[in-house]
Image (tube, helix red, strand yellow):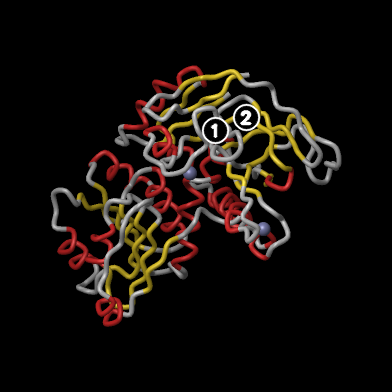
Amino acid sequence: MQGITFPGDRRAVLKDFPDPEPGPGEVVVRMRASGMCGSDLHFYRGTASFGGGPDMIQGHEPCGEVHAVGAGVTPDMAAVGDRVMIHHYWACETCDHCRSGWPQMCDGGDVHTLCIDEPGGHAPYMVVPVRTLLPLPDGLSFKAGAAVGCGTGTAWGGLKRLGDLGGANLVVLGQGPVGLSGTMLASALGARVIGVDINDARLERAHGFGASHVVNSATADLTEVIQDLTGGRGADLVLETSGRANADALKILGKWGRACFIGLPGDVSFRTEDVFRNQWTLMTSWTLSSIEQGRCADFIASRELPVDDLFTRSWSLDQAAEAYAWFDRQTDGKGVFEW
Ligand SMILES: [Zn+2]
Ligand SMILES: [Zn+2]
């Protein structure tokens, strides 16, 4: 089979790999959708300080059907034909973090991450431990399951860390695929969402995903507009998804505000006295747990949220170069490879 690799100089190259076989406790998943995530761009551009190198199959938003099961995988664990999402990390399985669904935080230190340590989903087949599988709800498409695996799931994880959203004024900074997901999910969870971006086309889409108001921060005075929209209180909550508006997040945050920074990497600067006088809570959020991944999918399915509409382009594997050149411009929506 062939899979997409990144030599690290803004090229996406197909390379030959053997078809994977399932070992004990493993399954081979036949890929049906493999999402393009913003964090792919760090590896594509060669700007990440870590990564899987030039021979690693990329893609950490896989979704598909079980194709083959290894020794010890019983039918209650997985069966050929099951529609599955994948939590894209695995580790020791016995420490507190692994047992609570957070293998990316494993105490043992031997964390396996798709597309960094293990071959990812940008190929027709992928092998993973059976314990990484989650059922894909009937109402969700494969590409929706892919989005929940990282981009949309990361927005869900950030919102869960922010806490109670009901009735709050939430500003979502950045309306790319993660920010739009935040707008969509937070609106459904009861927040009044103000979407911010510097791209009018993205702001137009934010309305369709539930934003009550949108602001172009390149042309408007963001602080002034947020003050106006909140009766002078400032934002109750901020979800920063762009990685470029950390300073804006603190400028618009009201007293007792909570801000979550999920656009990585980036510096956040603050005077402790400002945090103190405003009683702010500042946090970040690392993707989401396997448990929350399942809950996010169930929530989207039960509310029939338009997660498929996050995707503006669908590609086949042999269009990898064109697909990533398009995604690298970061002016449109989300892309997905489909089979
Ligand atoms: Zn562990
Ligand atoms: Zn990702």
Q: Is mark 2 within 8 Å of ligand 2?
A: no
Q: Looking at the picture, which amino acid does disc 1 mark?
A: Ser
Q: Marks 2 and 1, Cα distance to the nearest angstrom? A: 7 Å
**189 or 87, which is in the foreground?**
87
Vertical position of residue 282 compared to residue 322: above or below = below
For label 1, the SS is strand
Determine crowd level at label 1: few under 14, some 14-19, many 20+ residues with C-alpha closer than 10 A.
many
The answer to which quarter of the image holds residue 94 is bottom right
The answer to which quarter of the image holds residue 122 is top right
- Tell me what residue is drawn at x 53 percent, y 47 percent: 304
Vertical position of residue 248 compared to residue 280: above or below = above
Could you say where residue 316 lies in the image, as x and y percent from the top left? 50, 21
Vertical position of residue 26 compared to residue 172: above or below = above
Could you say where residue 197 lies in the image, as x and y percent from the top left? 26, 48
The answer, for residue 106, to whether it is visible in the render is yes
Vertical position of residue 5 compared to residue 200: above or below = above
The answer, for residue 306, to whether it is visible in the render is no
Q: Looking at the picture, which amino acid does disc 2 mark?
A: Met
Q: Is mark 1 within 8 Å of ligand 2?
A: no
- Tell me what residue is drawn at x 33 percent, y 70 percent: 236
Which numbered circle lies on residue 31? 2
**212 or 71, which is in the foreground?**
71
CB of mark 2 within 8 Å of CB of mark 1?
A: yes
Could you say where residue 115 lies in the image, as x and y percent from the top left? 55, 37
Determine crowd level at label 2: few under 14, some 14-19, many 20+ residues with C-alpha closer than 10 A.
many
Which numbered circle lies on residue 247? none
Which numbered circle lies on residue 34? 1
- Tell me what residue is drawn at x 34 percent, y 59 percent: 193
Q: Quadrant of the N terminus?
A: top right
**63 or 298, which is in the foreground?**
63
